[in-house]
Image (spheres, grey):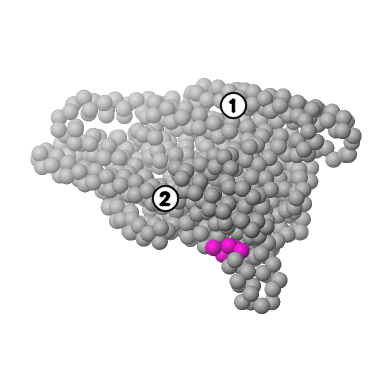
Amino acid sequence: MTAVVGRVVSADALLLDRLRERLAAEARKVARNDLVRLLADLPAVDDPRPLRVLVAGETKRGKSTLLNTLVGRPLLSPVGVDVTTTCWVEVAHGQRDEAEVVLANPAAPGEPTRRRCALEDVRRYAAPAGLADSVVGVQVRLRAPILRNLTIVDTPGVGGLEAGHARTTLAALRTADALLFVCDSRQPVSAPELDFLVEAARRVPTVVVAVTKCDVNPRFDDVVEATRQVVEGTPGLGAAPVLPVAAPLADRATEVHDERRAQRMRQISGIERLMDALHRHGTAATAAVRLENAALVLAEVCRTLLARSDEIVEILDGNTSREERLRRDIAAMRDALDEAPRFGALVERSLAHLHAEPAAAFDARVEQLRSRYCAVAASGSAAQLADLESRYLGEVAAAAVAAIEQTARDAAGIVADLVQRLGGADRWPVTSTTAPAAFSIGLQPPDGPTGGGGTDLVASAELFTALVEVLAGSVVVVSVLTGPGIIAAGIALAAGASWLTSRAGDQERRTRLTEWVDQVATEACATFRIEVGNRVRDAERRVAAELPALIAGRRHELSRLSDELDGIRSTGRDLRTELAQRRRAAEGLRDVEREAAALAARARAVRGA
């Protein structure tokens, strides 16, 4: 199936290039250099960048052991019966082996501090003890050949899929090319695991399921087959391969001197088959997503050029009301630009409620968590107390992720309405806020509204990209250790900096835990309110600064359209001939739009194949 996907994507990529060249030629005819640049800057469908794989799964399923085996470092990420990963561990290729710890910054949750660490200390920072240092994550670079085409991210494991870590992991999937989901051979995939997989499949183009610990269950085949049947029968997951693996067997193969025997052990372990599945399925599906996004951009450019063409045709055909509206729009934008010094106050009024509503929603959610975890601290079982701190911080971070993402969505919607009201853009642009974030379409900042032609589409796209970047961290994410997840983790970990390290009797520990839960809730809410307030103010300044350029660009384009109409009339050209030519050109653009829409639909179908 993957080979078929590759051929389909390859053939459609050639069609995409032809459509792009045709549209660029049409854009040049009307001096829309901004659209020419947009088309030229689209990323290649076969981008050779390393595949980003997120590893997730329930607690104690062996995901950290599997990651260690995949990168050839059995002792890298924390493993063991009583040990689990409490932060993000990102492993990528580097010129030398090195590691860096990412620490929460109480003064600026979105700007963590970094500190180099020895490779052998990665396990300590990624284990529960690392919470005492407010460790958000660890970035590791290894001189491992397998990592030249692969970046692997281990997710926090404390609390499993039922705790806040699940929401944070789902948010991070927007930065990934593939999800490697880990369950084990003790039982078929569970209902909570399946629910997570269904949600994950909506956010990432490729899902591969690894059934671990097959070396300790003689009847692992039955469990693997049962899991495969459940996955295949679940809508949205049918294409996900389910593969048995025995990571320890691959690790032991490195100690065997007989190469034939070692190769056989690696083959039996299932690791090589797993890696092949990740590369084949991940590369093909990622290319399909890039193809779909590029086709959506082409369709949007078509609509922009068609809107311009239709306006001229209607006016030349005698639609006087359309021409009067054109004149009114130009005059209204001129008046709006005269009011540009007051845009700051207008934007501030439009976004005013974002200073309070997100914080109120976060406060309400944290109060629910505070009440629940105080009850657990007071009367929960010893097992519940064992990882209470990690679970609580994970859920506080998840609440912050949800609130930050909602704030960004609300702000984008408000500003879109404002831009349209002022005439800065005639439609919602295709940007990385409307396309999957991991495959953003690479819109570049415009050079400005003068000289290069109208900038309504590209400039407004840049504004929305910048807006979400200000509110939720980097949109074009180069690492999972950026964006809303890092801000949320920073808020939670900074609030929980008073990690309990002293040993105490049961009742004293319960009392201290209850006090700590209260303290975290209070400090997290205060920090969140300050952080969101700062980000909303930054967004207000950014929008107020960009709006005049958007309106000026749109006015420039409409003025040029008006001048073109005047030029046609002043030269005495035959209007019927002119209309016929323009209608043919418009029909050609509609053909391109239909082909681009069909291209996007095929790419979506390929992803689900």
Q: Which residue is mark 1?
A: 358
Residue 156: image x %, image y %?
67, 45
Residue situated in front as seen by the camera: 341 or 167:
167
Residue 245 spot, x, y in % from top left: 60, 59
Residue drawn 17% across the image and 44% down it: 584
Q: Are marks 1 and 2 in contact (CB under 8 Å)?
A: no
Quick check: can you spot residue 177?
Answer: no
Any mark on residue 607, and which? 2
Above or below: residue 397 compared with residue 515: below
533 left or right, relative to 347: right
Q: Residues within 10 Å of mark 1 (few under 14, many from 20)?
A: many
Given residues 457 and 157, the one toward you in this image is 157
Range of the magenta residues? Answer: 269-273
State which quarter of the image contains the N terminus.
Answer: bottom left
Query: What's the residue type where badge 2 is placed?
Result: Arg
* Residue shown at 10% from the left, 39% from the top: 576
Q: How many residues crowd around disc 2 within 10 Å: few (fewer than 14), some, or many (20 or more)?
A: many
Q: Residue at x 71, y 37 (%)?
A: 391
Residue 8 image position (x, y, % from top left): 35, 57
Describe residue 345's horizontal placement relative to residue 109 as left or right. Answer: left
Query: Gap in Å between the C-alphas at discs 1 and 2?
Result: 35 Å
Looking at the image, is 71 positioned above or below residue 598? Answer: below
- Which dot, 1 or 2, sits closer to the camera? 2
Q: Main secondary structure of the magenta part?
A: helix
Find residue 294 and report its horizontal and vertical position in percent. Answer: 38, 49
Q: Visible in this render: residue 366?
A: yes
Q: Is residue 600 positioned above or below 532 on the image?
A: below
Element under label 1? helix
